[in-house]
Amino acid sequence: MAHMTNDMTAVRRACAFGVIAGFDAVFLFFATLVFMLTLNAKLTLYALIPLPIISLISLFFVRLLFKKFKSVQESFSLLTEKVREMVSGIKIIQAFQQEEPESKNFDKLSQEYLGKNISLIKIWGTMFPLIFLFAEIGMAIILWVGGQQVILNELSIGELVAFLSYMGIIVWPMMAVGMVTN
């Protein structure tokens, strides 16, 4: 029952979030890209330099996350099956005085489950800072190139601020796709 509930929660989250993230990924990305191109095509091309790297990071980590998530689910299944066995066979366990070995076995399975969850979280904890690093590199490129264009009066300060905002908007769909595929 716990395994089914855990699976259903994962499916529910994926479906609900998947629809929103899918819409965001398509609509926000292309709408923002059009706004950026109409504002300043040259600066847009510079701003898009880190985006393929962000996509590659997402693809790489999504594969790892899928494997780790599957491992966590399998470990959860073993843990819940062990609890089910212990509860249904509690009289036999007590009759043969196997409480201590069963408790140790349960502790071992619990530690494995914990370790796999921590491993999964470490991957998440590596993926998002990397994505943000390259997003910030894009921001730095916009500041550098856009700042030069502002100095040369080729771009207004307001347009530069708009570009920085657009860059923040355009990174989200790429992250959302990574989360949904996980």
Image (cartoon, rainbow, N blue to C red):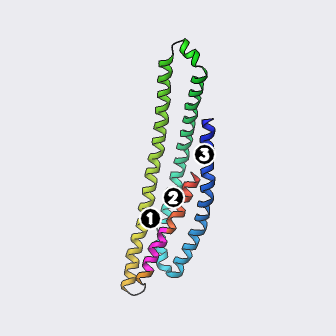
Distance from label 3 to label 2 (Cα)? 28 Å
Query: Label 1: which residue?
Result: 135
The region drawn magenta spans 159-168
Is the Cβ of the residue at disc 2 closer than 8 Å to that at disc 1? no
Q: Dot 2, how many residues are within 10 Å of its Cα: few (below 14), some (14-19), or many (20+)?
A: few
Query: Label 2: which residue?
Result: 56
Label 1 sits on a secondary structure element that is helix
Q: Amino acid at mark 2?
A: Leu
Q: Is residue 128 above or below residue 165?
A: above
Q: Amino acid at mark 1?
A: Ala
Query: Label 3: which residue?
Result: 9
Dominant secondary structure of the residues highlighted in magenta in the image? helix
Q: Is residue 29 magenta?
A: no
Q: Is residue 53 above or below residue 13?
A: below
Label 2 sits on a secondary structure element that is helix
Left or right, residue 114 beside residue 22: left
Q: Amino acid at mark 3?
A: Thr
Precedes in sequence: disc 3 or disc 1: 3
Precedes in sequence: disc 3 or disc 2: 3
Q: Residue furthest left?
A: 151
Could you say which is closer to the camera, residue 163 or residue 149? 163
Spot occupied by residue 84 in the image (x, y as percentages of width and height): 60, 27
Q: Residue furthest bottom?
A: 153
Q: Dot 3, how many residues are within 10 Å of its Cα: few (below 14), some (14-19), or many (20+)?
A: few
